[in-house]
């Protein structure tokens, strides 16, 4: 029997699992992550909340982050994820850009099954989403730098991060997908992962 239930998408999994929603700013990873956490009745970690003030101020000025800037941020987010996993039998949903393989390496927890959900879309579509967004430190003008740094994940790269018995799997979701449909897609993939354990 699936740990997530074939009929109800709101069942809590039997074993801990991490869901990482990743993609450029404006791709919808925070919206999807929050909805997934609601469906799974679990903790949601918003990656932006783990940025040091210096990073936020830098991005607000329109200055792209370097990997040196990202390193302490990803370390803090990884620590927060491990702390959230201490709850017994509880999944954790994380939203984080993870633009390149080095960033995914820094965040990955090899011993915990993980579904990496990459939100994929064109520069034009995501720029339009950012232009419509208000109240966020990442401006639409910064999107070009994010696409320049983006190295989309591939199944083999993601699979290589898992320790024996802890599968790491990639799921690509188009940014144009309605949120409800994207949630259902992720939950079905979690069911398939659970069925293998």
Image: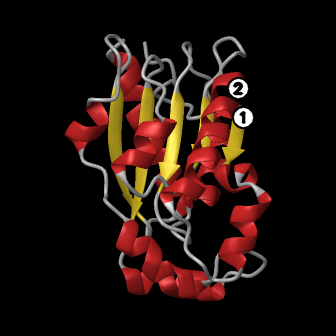
Q: Quadrant of the C terminus?
A: top left
What x and y, as percent, mark residue 137? 72, 74
In the image: residue 153, left or right of residue 142: left
What x and y, as percent, mark residue 11? 61, 26
Residue 64, by quadrant, is bottom right
Of 28 and 50, which appears nearest the observer? 50
Secondary structure beneath label 2: helix
Query: Residue 79, relative to residue 196: is it above or below?
Result: below
Mark 2 — residue?
84
Look at the image and name its color scheme: secondary structure
Query: Residue 103, relative to residue 169: is it above or below?
Result: below
Mark 1 — residue?
43
Of 71 and 175, which appears nearest the observer? 71
Find out whether the residues at labels 2 and 1 contact each other: C-beta distance under 8 Å.
yes
For the point 31% across and 60% down, the residue is: 151
In the image: residue 151, left or right of residue 78: left
């Amino acid at each position: 029997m699936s740990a997530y239930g074939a009929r109800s998408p709101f069942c809590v999994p039997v074993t801990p699992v991490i869901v990482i929603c990743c993609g450029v700013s404006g791709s919808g990873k925070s919206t999807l992550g929050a909805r997934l956490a609601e469906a799974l009745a679990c903790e949601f970690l918003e990656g932006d909340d783990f940025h040091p003030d210096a990073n936020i101020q830098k991005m607000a000025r329109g200055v792209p982050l370097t990997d040196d800037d990202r390193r302490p941020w990803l370390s803090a987010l990884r620590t927060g994820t491990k702390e959230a996993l201490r709850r017994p039998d509880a999944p954790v949903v994380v939203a984080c850009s993870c633009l390149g393989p080095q960033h995914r390496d820094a965040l990955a927890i090899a011993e915990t099954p993980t579904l990496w959900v990459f939100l994929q879309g064109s520069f034009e579509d995501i720029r339009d989403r950012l232009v419509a967004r208000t109240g966020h430190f990442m401006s639409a003008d910064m999107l070009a730098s994010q696409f320049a740094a983006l190295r989309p994940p591939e199944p083999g790269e993601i699979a290589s991060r898992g320790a024996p018995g802890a599968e790491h799997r990639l799921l690509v979701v188009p940014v144009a997908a309605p949120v409800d449909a994207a949630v259902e897609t992720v939950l079905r993939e979690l069911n398939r992962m659970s069925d293998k354990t």
